[in-house]
Amino acid sequence: MIRKLNITLVFLFAGVLTGLAQFDVSPEGFGSYQGTEENQEDSLDFNDSRRKKVPSIIRTWELTSFGANMEETELDTSLNFFQVYDPVFQRNFSNTFTGNLGGAYISDDYFSRDSYSDFYFYQAFDAYAKFPESVRYFNTTTPYTLLDYSQSENKNVRSESRFNVFHSQNSNRKFNFAFLYDQARSAGQYQLQETKFHTIGFLGSYVSDKFNSHFNILFNRHEAQENGGLQPGQDLNEYKETETYLVNLAAARSKLQNNTFSVTNEYKLGKMEKAQTEKGEEYEFFRPITGIIHQIEYSGNKRLFTDPDADAATEGFYPDFYFAPDSTGDTISYNRLTNVFQLKFYEAPGRKFTFSKRAYAAYDMISIKMPGDESYLLEKEKLNNVYVGGGISRTEGEFWKWNAEGKIYLTGYRSGQTELSAYIYKPLKIGKDTTSLYVAGELNTLVPDPFVRSYSSNHYKWSNQFNNINEMIIRSKIHSQEYHLTVGANYSLVSNYIYNDSTAHPRQAGAEMLVLSAYANKDFISKHWLIRTQILWQNTSQKNYLHLPSFTGYLSLSYKTVISKVMHTILGFDVRYNTEFYADAYEPATGRFHWQDKQKIGNYPFLDLHANLKLKRTRAFFQLKNAASGFLPGDFWSAPDYPLYRRTFRLGIAWSFYD
């Protein structure tokens, strides 16, 4: 009943907002969007005698560098790859994960293991949540609404459903507000595998010549049954019914929650200047010279792990019982309040040699709670950090773009931590092709996470005195626009690397570790065909600390056509493959992955068939996932002890509204 009420309220909210008035002047600035060709054809319906219709122009951006930069993004309404709806595989094409929508994951690409969350126990689930760094802001001439729904073949048995709502509109040409609601639920095919997660968010922006303001309020929730994976020695092809397979845990559950509030304000000082249009008409515009920026962010996080029947778990599954011998009720919280004060000097577009400069000072207040003694009373710890930083960059002009910045922690828990980074982006004109070269580097000295240093719970407890992590990272790639080709290579040298060992306890490596990767991404595009190929090679010098698949590949082949001149149709398949390797194992009591050398997974083609349809502003997909299961020999493990679902059907539909 509560779920139905939530969905009803969301529809009512979206309907009321859509009915509100919008302005009829297109926003100025970067990144206008007018929809796909089909959407633009729909919007040509302006000549309605009853009322004047406004063309839908949308621009979107994200905030970076503590709100100092507004980086343009694109609104994706394409039918291509619409079938890739799982947030984990939208982020990375190859992952080790627990086999179910909403399950824990870790990228198989070492250089893609970044997280938006700084809460240690949220990082294996952050793809299912929204954080300020991943929020996209809008400016629209007409209200924009997106309804996105998908479900499994049977909504009552082994069900999987997903429902997302997004609405954005301007009250005037400067102020935009938006609402988002994402929710999903998956029962899974195996015993005790249900997951649920949802996000509710409110965000807005005010952008003008002299003052910019951005805010967001985000509520993330994630809940899962933790079955501990299948018991050892079971063949995935042995039983017809997946419920027959035995799992390790019968009553364990985990809950994650995150509440985030963030506001970024910028006041700009500058002067009015004159310029001419291409037709020679003179106009005035405001050129910012200096920006004064303040950002405040509060992030409240909590993880609960309960197992009322812990003594009945498979023998030896839990390594220890520190507080309670027959049940578990661990609660860990991490709250952070951050203030950043920043001064930015803008580039002068009319000058040939110019670059922007910025400097900032910031303060973190952190509080941590976790079980601390035999009576399960919470142990409290308060931390703080004071740090300063700055950067210079060149983003105007077409010759090249570059950026260099650094940060150092002066006092507090992370005292002595330094982070230096830089990149160069250079377009190269080769014949008719526009080729670009990108090179980036990082040099970091990192203080280990507070939870890596000290942690206490019913099943795990540690106290470590780790040295700082030193790492050097170099990334490079070349992209050809004409040939739709990207080739790249990555290099990382790490000393004092911290990993979770075979017992899921943090350990520090005793030797330097070198990680190398090379990749090639190529799209073949014609009138009727779209073929995407991605190949990744990786190698590490220390397999005692880190296991990676040597080769990982992705192939998507699609045939495109138009039925009856109106129905855009794509038929095709996706294949994901990686060589066999000792993938990290998942530990449910803490929600982390750890090193293991007992079970190899991989060497199995995960095949998905899809049919995508688009009629005006409505998109739909029909997908047969893991279609090769039951036909090909081999075990389709997606993580050690965690199998992927057997062949199953999914369908989804999305509606876009621009007025």
Image: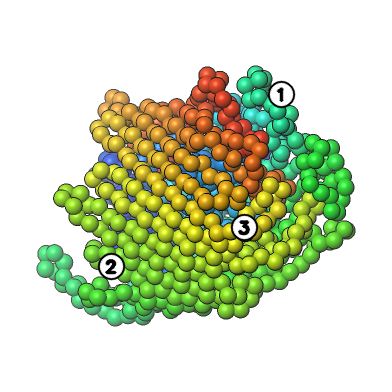
Q: Are marks 2 and 1 in contact (CB under 8 Å)?
A: no
Q: Quadrant of residue 105?
A: top right
Residue 3 seen in the figure: no
Residue 106 location, x and y as percent? Answer: 57, 46
Between discs 3 and 2, the one toward the N terminus: 2
> Mark 3 or mark 2, which is nearer to you?
3
Q: Tell me which amino acid carries mark 3.
A: Ala
Which circle's residue, 1 or 3, is located before the other in the chain? 1
Residue located 87% across and 45% down the image: 326
The circle on residue 396 is 2
Q: Amino acid at mark 2?
A: Glu
- Whether residue 117 can be seen here: yes
Give percent across and percent down for residue 619: 40, 35
Vertical placement of residue 30 versus 312, above or below: below
Q: Earlier in the sequence, mark 2 or mark 1?
A: 1
Is disc 3 in contact with disc 2, using a CB cutoff of under 8 Å?
A: no
Q: Name the image quarter holding the N terminus.
A: top right
Residue pointed to by mark 3: 509
Q: Amino acid at mark 1?
A: Thr
Closer to the camera in the image, 364 or 59? 364
Label 2 CA crowd tier, 10 Å (few <14, some 14–19, many 20+): some
Q: Residue 244, which numbered label?
A: 1
